[in-house]
Amino acid sequence: MQASLEQLSQITVFAGLTTADKISLQPQTQLQNYSKGEMILHEGDRLPAKLYAVVSGSIQVSKTATTGKETILRTLAVGEIFAAPALLGNGISPATVTAESECEILTVERDALLKAIQQNPEIALQMLMVFNNRIQQLHETVHGLVSERAIVRLARLIQYYAAESGTERTTEGETLKVKLSYYRMARSVGISYEECVRLIKSLNSMITYSRGGKITILDTHQLDAIALGGME
């Protein structure tokens, strides 16, 4: 099934296209549904020459070391693109992509995308901005793993998702709209599950953690201080 004009408009890099341009792109698109936990791409697989984007739901991007340890690189939501090597690299998936919830993935054939870029260079600029932001995030992550304490990395992770996914004001404080399980946080900042549980408990004056990964920020200033490395 091909994407609708509304679905194409949801993709960040296509948002600025005219209706006529989207209509010409439609025949080269395809939609695929995935269930929660289902694998979309496997690390090391050869990828078809397509652009991949999230139309609904969210996905998780992770890598697994030779030791079997999994590291969660990022979570992507509606409108975001992924699997850049399918278009620009060696065509090999650099990571495993899994459906974090029920989701719908849109793909666009490479040749059709290149034609659209020729007519609308802004698409290429938008793609470069996305990839540049991710490279910057990767640099910060690597720097944090090498030089920052685990509790600092954890505080920054909570801040990141609060900014990225938003929060809801409650009587207690600001509750993150996204659920962050102990496992997910541990794998995102490079620590063990047990250490993550211990560190989250040590932050109980500034955040609360409820079953299922519900996090509420009680004291933003204290959390900021931890994230800046200014508190033990």
Image (cartoon, rainbow, N blue to C red):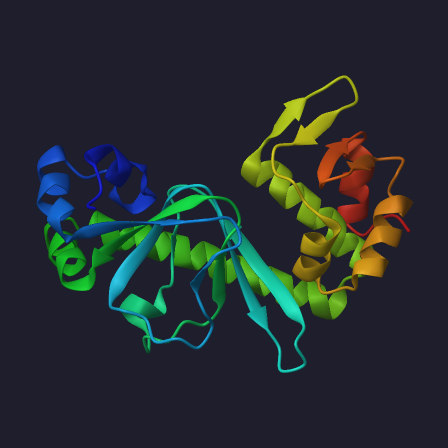
Residue at figure coordinates x 53%, y 54% from the top left: 37
User: How many tags in the picture?
Assistant: 0
Question: Image height check: is 90 above or below 161?
Answer: below
Most extreme residue toward the bottom is 66
Residue at figure coordinates x 80%, y 52% from the top left: 229
Along the line of sight, which residue is nearer the eye, 142 or 185?
A: 185
Along the line of sight, which residue is nearer the eye, 197 or 104?
A: 104
- Judge whether residue 84 can be spotted in this image: yes
- Tell me where residue 192 appears, x and y as whole percent: 79, 64
Please give left or right for residue 132 compared with residue 17 in the image: right
Please give left or right for residue 87 compared with residue 187 in the image: left
Residue at figure coordinates x 16%, y 54% from the top left: 117
Please give left or right for residue 185 compared with residue 34 in the image: right
Question: Image height check: is 34 above or below 217?
Answer: below
- Tell me where residue 32 appears, x and y as whole percent: 32, 51
Along the line of sight, which residue is nearer the eye, 229 or 166?
A: 166
Most extreme residue toward the top is 171
Question: Image height check: is 95 above or below 182?
Answer: below
Along the line of sight, which residue is nearer the eye, 202 or 225?
A: 202
Residue at figure coordinates x 21%, y 37% from the top left: 4
- Tell me where residue 196 appears, x and y as whole percent: 81, 55
Please give left or right for residue 163 compared with residue 46 in the image: right
- Judge whether residue 15 can be spotted in this image: no
Quadrant of residue 204 in the image?
top right
